[in-house]
Image (cartoon, rainbow, N blue to C red):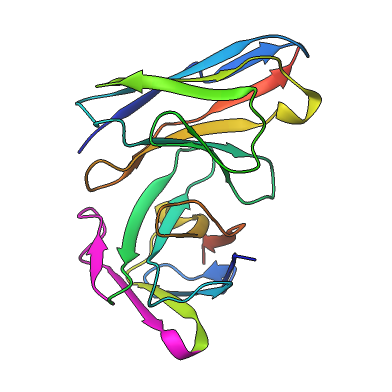
Amino acid sequence: DIQMTQSPSFLSASVGDRVTINCKASQNINKYLNWYQQKLGEAPKRLIYNTNNLQTGIPSRFSGSGSGTDYTLTISSLQPEDFATYFCLQHNSFPLTFGSGTKLEIK
Amino acid sequence: QVQLKESGPGLVQPSETLSLTCTVSGFSLTSYGVNWVRQPPGKGLEWMGTIWNDGSTDYNSALKSRLSISRDTSKSQVFLKMNSLQTEDTAIYLCARGSFAYWGQGTLVTVSS
């Protein structure tokens, strides 16, 4: 199974900050990596698919990058509505596996 | 628009069978697969299995002996059945469309006597 190591687990930041969240796969996942935002009681929302493709309707302050085993989600300028939990999903091979999540909190 | 909604019992007795339904709208089950995912309290997400648009299935090997996913295309419903439940199966159970672009909100299942 491919292990996804997500970091950091918690992140405290201010409105306007640039933040990055990382997912490291235990083996090459060929850019089959999605990023999600989840707020309490809501369905997860896909932000980025296949490493760097912005989901329709998602603001351009969200971006993704990476290759091989290392992937990054960047939020260029945090907005109040961005404080949430973020997680990654690798869909290169079964079983599909997720990162453990990053809780982004207001500083 | 695309919607998925999970439903089922909130409480299940240990050793019993869990039955959940994912009711979808805005797309056809013959065009898209549906995944089941769960999240135990305070833990990460676990992919459980997928029913593909042709009706075939893939399961997480860790759960395969206890898990069954099926569907009724006429009712736009996907079913999850898992037997021999234990307390560690307490989790929020979510369904998501094939490429995980759309998810339901999830339903909390507590395994307790």
Q: Which residues are magenta?
A: B55-74
Residue B37 makes an appearance in the image = yes
Above or below, comparing residue B105 to residue A53 in the picture = below
Residue B68 is covered by the magenta coloring: yes
Above or below, comparing residue B44 to residue B66 in the picture = above
Which quadrant of the figure contains the N terminus of chain A? Answer: top left
Q: Quarter of the image holding residue B19?
A: bottom left
Residue A74 is covered by the magenta coloring: no
Which quadrant of the figure contains the C terminus of chain A? Answer: top right
Which residue corresponds to the image point at 52% horizontal and 67% vertical from the top-left? B113
Residue A71 makes an appearance in the image = no
Q: Is residue A7 left or right of residue A18?
A: left
Q: Position of residue B28 (x, y in %)?
A: 47, 76
Q: Is residue A75 left or right of residue A3?
A: right
Which residue corresponds to the image point at 23% horizontal and 53% vertical from the top-left? B62
Q: Quarter of the image holding residue A32?
A: top left
Which residue corresponds to the image point at 25% horizontal and 40% vertical from the top-left? A92
Above or below, comparing residue A51 to residue B47 in the picture = above
Q: Position of residue B105 (x, y in %)?
A: 62, 57
Q: Position of residue B90 (x, y in %)?
A: 48, 55
Number of marks in picture: 0
Q: Position of residue A14 (x, y in %)?
A: 76, 11
List the single residue furthest toward the bottom: B74
- In the image shown, does A104 or B54 lie closer to the viewer? B54
